[in-house]
Image (spheres, grey):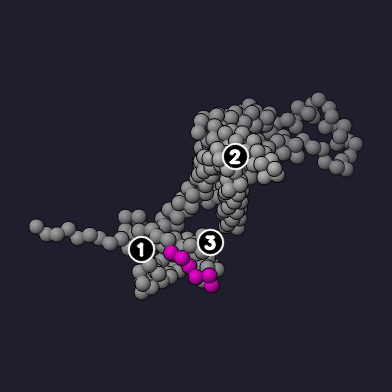
Amino acid sequence: MGGRVVNDALTNLLIPTALSMIIGECTEVSPWLARLVLRLAARRLGNPEAAERYEAEWIALLDERPGKLLKLFFATWIALRSSWTLRAIHRSPAGSSDASSATAGSPDARGEQRPRRGQWVRAYLRESQIRRSGGYYRGDRYYPDRRRWGSAAARRRRRRNSALGLCGILAWMLGGAAQATGITGVVVIGIAMPLLISLAYPFSTRTLSRLDSRMAAASLRREDWSLGVVRVPTGDIRMIRRTLAQGGRPHIADTKQGGDQFVRVVDITLGGLAFVVRPRRRRLRPRR
């Protein structure tokens, strides 16, 4: 009896959540909502001239995010961040004098402070945008640096949290599917697998883009090198990660080739799998 109640509750909770996420990922509802949220957040700045510029910059950053649901989450985070910034700027400092409060309360002083507040908002958002994405300004136009997204520790923390989140969602889905029977199990599995694929897509694309950037930094062309996956011994994982972080070129023995061939490590995952490159074997055409 208890198992049936748990299965019914799981199904009633999973089906609406999965359907809403599938609709948001497979349709254009999420990108439209994301642009609407960014437009409203830009208008809340109180400066019509800067609103259009910030809206264009935020939409440019929005287009770089993979996945439609991820775009909506990113737009929501930008809107909350701008609201927190405006609240911190408009909040009166503690312990202010009576003269300053009386001066600030006059209509002339408020009229003079409005453009200054807009300048503070623009300066703060500009500095936070540079710190977050590592981009730069040329005149009034912003150019994000796609090769860098925060510090190395922040990137490692995001990869670890993404992997743990995907593993937790997978375990939850498989546990619910194992307990469900009959048509309920078929429905749960049919919804869980597309949802898991849509959640794993941003993580996989981020891994491939990181591999491409590392191969480009090492001057390794895809035409001359083939990419492979090799299992790394447990004791060597930390040493290889340290060597990669210091800009070194670690090599390990290729167990698939009998252990007599050394391959170069490009990246290493949390589970101890190393992405390696091997020279491509050129097939010689027979002479006629």
In the rendered image, the vertical position of residue 149 relative to residue 276, given as above or below: above
> What residue sits right under mark 2 in the picture?
74
Q: Which mark is residue 271?
A: 3
Q: Is residue 185 visible?
A: yes
- Quarter of the image that includes the N terminus: top right
Q: Which label sits in the foreground, 1 or 2?
A: 1
* Marks 1,2: beta carbons within 8 A: no
Q: Which residue is mark 1?
A: 278
Distance between mark 1 and mark 2 Cα atoms: 38 Å
Q: CA distance from mark 3 to mark 2?
A: 28 Å
> The residue under label 3 is which amino acid type?
Gly
Quadrant in the picture for residue 24: top right
> Badge 3 local density, few (<14 within 10 Å), some, or many (20+)?
few
Furthest residue in direction left, as rendered? 288
Q: Secondary structure at mark 3?
A: loop
In the picture, measured across the screen, residue 77 lies left or right of residue 235, that is right
* Residue at the spot 49% in from the left edge and 49% down from the top edge: 204
Count the labels in the image. Answer: 3
Quarter residue 59 falls in: top right
Label 3, label 1: how far apart the Cα atoms are: 21 Å
User: Residue 248's x, y, as percent?
Assistant: 47, 67
* Nearer the observer, 197 or 107: 197
Residue drawn at (51%, 64%) of the image: 272
Q: Who's the residue at 87% across and 40% down the image? A: 96
Magenta span = 230-235
Q: Nearer the viewer, residue 140 or 276?
A: 276
| Magenta stretch holds residue 21 | no
Query: Tag 1's secondary structure?
Result: strand
Kind of residue sitting beneath label 2: Phe
Report the side of 280 relative to 103 (left or right): left
Q: Position of residue 195 (x, y in %)?
A: 54, 41
| Residue 211 screen position, x and y as percent | 45, 55
